[in-house]
Image: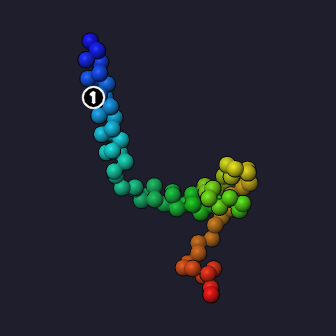
């Protein structure tokens, strides 16, 4: 009895692991990539690592996220 339960648990673990690997190995769809870019377009002014969508608030301080302007190159590092 113990052997069959362990065998079943092991088989189930393998199936779950394989399902996870297959689901994570796929490429992001174009819509998912655009959504990620759109979410990154808003960030907290006090905590720039906190990003989200329009009308979201910062999870650390509650401030409204502001639209982030894209920077090209390293213009801020002029020496």
Q: Give the quarter of the figure containing the N terminus.
A: top left
Judged from this view, the residue extending furthest toward the top is 1
**Residue 29 rendering spot, x and y as whole percentages:** 40, 56
Horizontal side of 52 relative to 12 (left or right) equals right
22 above or below 41? Answer: above
Residue drawn at 59 percent across, 75 percent down: 71
20 above or below 27? Answer: above
1 above or below 70? Answer: above
Judged from this view, the residue extending furthest toward the front is 2
59 above or below 31? Answer: above
Residue hosting label 1? 11
Name the one closer to the observer, 60 or 10.
10
Residue 6 is drawn in which quadrant? top left
The answer to whether residue 35 shows anywhere in this view is yes
Residue drawn at 40 percent across, 55 percent down: 28
Name the one closer to the observer, 66 or 47.
47
Name the one closer to the observer, 38 or 48.
48
Residue drawn at 57 percent across, 57 percent down: 39
Horizontal side of 46 relative to 18 (left or right) equals right
The answer to whether residue 53 shows anywhere in this view is no
**Residue 79 rendering spot, x and y as whole percentages:** 62, 87
**Residue 4 rendering spot, x and y as whole percentages:** 25, 17
Say how the picture is coloured. rainbow
Assign a secondary structure to mark 1: helix
């Amino acid at each position: 009895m113990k052997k069959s339960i362990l065998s079943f648990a092991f088989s189930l673990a393998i199936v779950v692991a394989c399902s996870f690997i297959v689901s994570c190995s796929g490429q992001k769809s174009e819509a998912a990539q655009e959504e990620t870019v759109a979410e990154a377009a808003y960030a907290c002014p006090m905590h720039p690592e906190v990003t989200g969508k329009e009308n979201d608030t910062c999870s650390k301080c509650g401030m409204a996220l502001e639209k982030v302007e894209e920077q090209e190159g390293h213009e801020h590092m002029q020496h």
